[in-house]
Amino acid sequence: MSLVFVISPPRAGSTLLQRMMGAHSEVFTHPEPHLISPIAHLGVYGNVDKAPYDHINAAEAIKAFIDDLPNKQQDYLDALRAYTDTMYGRMLSTSSSSLFLDKTPANALVLPFLQRLYPDAKYVVLTRHPLAVFSSYANSFFNGDWEAAHAFNPILERYVPAMATFIRERPVPLLHVAYEDVVMEPERQLERIFAFLGIEHDPSAVDYGAAGGMKKGMGDPITVNQEGRPVTVSVDKWAQELAHDESKRALAESMIARLDGPDLAAWQWPAEALWAPLEAVGEGPPPKPPRNNYTLQRRIMLALKKDIHTRPHGKLVKRVKYYCDVLLRE
């Protein structure tokens, strides 16, 4: 079995690239499996404090157990890989393809673990202008509220350093691809990717819509499903947004200031080029926020979540949750 990982932050175009690559007959993919990040928190990886259990005792117990294995951590990694190999392999067996593609964004935050687990896999690293990533994230999940989005998850401060280190050190076979290049010259970028994967080039994969839709699951199928091939409309939308909002621009400058210059350069957006799209924006109107069922659901959820612990409906939600827990308890 051969594996391909697309490494990217959320909102960097990974679903688009997944659809394009998955249109090749030799590439089989599935909505974000999230197989890797949970097992990365079982004691080997450093961020066990994010695991949904008593992480302190669990980490100590597992590490003590691993220390007594004949080959210590290597035995543990072999066991974990046996699990993921089985899961990936069984899913791949449902197709006639030779490669399985996993594009789970959370994998980018456990790269030291992932590269030890799968040192022989192929890695396609997808980056996008950092502020385009954050703008899409805030507009998709927080109704355009940049402050709330950053307070909930400072994704640039988390993903940029992790992926930049990976790009610079190149500990595994990897190909770095920029979102902007994917949408502006998709044929050339797909040719690069397929050559890297060692499979025959398929020019028709650019028109991924002709290959049919993908099974619904984790990820963002909305924009991708609206088009049948890559479009450039979102490339500089972030700049149009900042040009009309001083508070967002101030937060953007603050976020970028927290990032190291070499890390931004590794993303192919060095400091001297980072603000050029904003400077090139004219006096046109600000971009309209996206309007679809996906964003509507998010807006409703945000409205309900605000001050939920002090508003009347919060008590109702807690009561409904209690009854659901009782009814679903096994």
Image: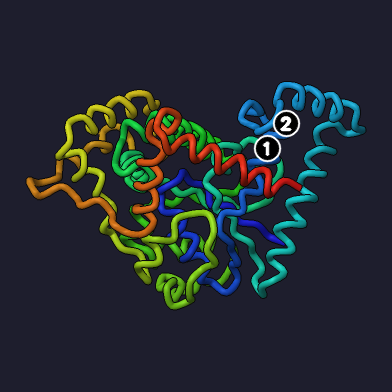
What's the mark number on residue 64?
none
Residue at 34 percent of width and 47 percent of height: 299
Q: Is residue 312 visible?
A: yes
What's the mark number on residue 40?
1
Mark 2 lies on a secondary structure that is loop
Residue at 43 percent of width and 38 percent of height: 313
Q: In this image, 172 relative to 183: left or right?
A: right
Residue 245, x across and y down, in percent: 17, 36
Tag 1: amino acid:
Ala
Which residue is most to the left?
Answer: 283
Question: Dot 2: within a 10 Å radius of its alpha carbon, few (fewer than 14), some, or many (20 or more) residues?
Answer: some
Nearer to us in this view, 310 or 170: 310
Q: Is residue 296 above or below residue 213?
A: above
Nearer to us in this view, 127 or 139: 139
Residue 212, x across and y down, in percent: 48, 75
Do the numbered discs 1 and 2 sit on residues whose CB atoms are within 8 Å? Answer: yes
Residue at 66 percent of width and 68 percent of height: 98
**Residue indicated by mark 2:** 44
Residue 218, x across and y down, in percent: 53, 54
